[in-house]
Amino acid sequence: MKYSKTLGSVALSTLLLLGIAGCSDNDTTVVEKPVAEVPVAPVEPEVPTISPYQRVAVIPGTWDDVNAIATKISQMAIYSNESETLGYPTNWVIAGANLGGGEADDGLADLLPIPAIGGKSRVIEFCNKAYATAAIATGRFHGSALPCEVSVHSDGTNVYVDMLDAEAIFNIFFTDAQDKSTDEENAEFAKLASAVKSELRGMIKSGLEDDGGLSGSAAVAYTESTLAMGPKFTQEFVENEISLRNPYIIYKYSGTGTGADGSFTLGDADTLAREIIAKLGTDAATADTNVPGVSKDSSWRSGRPEPISIPSVKVVEACSPKYAKKATALGNEYITALPCEITVYVDETDPTGQTLAISFLNPNFMFGTMFEGAVKNAYDDAKLTKDEVIEYSTLADVVFGDLRLIVDAAVQESALGLAIPHTP
């Protein structure tokens, strides 16, 4: 999809200064001297950019208010049908609290705690079956770019509600789909991204404004914001630079599934996802107790006790407090880039159905694109030392090494009896 826009240039006119001829008392003639025109530098038109992160609301408050505000927003989405309350085409749910899908919990446990500068933020994950189906139809490996994250955090004076900008995310993470689609298909996908962005913003505002209704609490006064945050990319940069980077790392495993003719089923993908979650562990028993060789003090654990169900895929969320703190130390605007997503699915490109696939969001892509310029800015602002900059330069490889060890351990011990993986 294309988001390039043409901005009209501003034409500048030059003022001509006119001399005045007259007579003196001695009848001498004053000869007019021409005034040289001063050249005016042309004004360059501003080039439109996109940014991965956008602010939605600013609320007076402190870290003590973060949990209540995050819960208010999420419960409004849980208990309302947006097709009725907001006129949206389809309904949204919150990951972990899809009551219609049999998930019973609707409390704070559904909101991921992410370490941030000054306190612990909360991440709300919005899911919409219709939009997710359209995204997954471009390739199931894209499941790692879902669901839609919204963060709630504070600086001690205000509480901020930020979201991933869906237009930017679809443009950055789906460049491969754009290359394979017609202009008409890309235009429709652009409309989808715009709708997702608009509906997310509407749901956040609706939750804050709800006064004792479905959200279960009083309305919260806020100032709406459209502040774009993080790196800024021109469309030319997206097409010529980012499109050459690969956001996904995919491993495929052959074997015999539980379906007809030995094919794998979504249930098999769910089994493997749960085995990965078991290796990731919990707050009480983290991955280092299950998987030898993970990096020191990483304390990886699963963000949820069960995988997130997205059409045709299962999503596992891996969290490391150590590496989350390093990411958000660069700025709380980056909270919504977390946690690390791992997608398990039946490979739709294998006509026999006898291949399971695992898609990672590539940590090198994430740090190189979603955090582009962040380390340099922090160093220039004296927030990082040279040694810390060097540590950040290897951080993506360390994170992926850990995740690969954890997934490999789950695969090797899987009840599915999977073969050695191969990359596509």
Image (tube, rainbow, N blue to C red):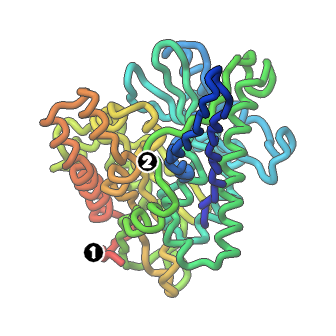
x, y percent for residue 172: 49, 59
The percent position of residue 266, horizontal first and vertical second, equals 54, 67
Query: How dense is the environment of label 1, judged by Cα within 10 Å: few (below 14), some, or many (20 and up)?
Result: few
Q: Is residue 282 above or below residue 155?
A: below
Contact, mark 1 vs mark 2 (Cβ under 8 Å): no
Q: Quadrant of residue 242?
A: bottom left
- Name the residue type under label 1: Ile
Residue at 78% in and 52% down? 90
Nearer the observer, disc 1 or disc 2?
Answer: 2
At label 2, which amino acid type do we have? Glu
Q: What residue did someone put label 1 on?
A: 420
User: On the rendered structure, is 378 left or right of 339?
Assistant: left
Nearest to the observer: residue 20 or residue 105: 20
Q: Residue at x 16, y 39 (%)?
A: 296
Q: Is residue 224 left or right of residue 162?
A: right
Identify the residue position indicated by label 2 in the image. 317
Could one spot residue 105 in this view of the protein?
A: no
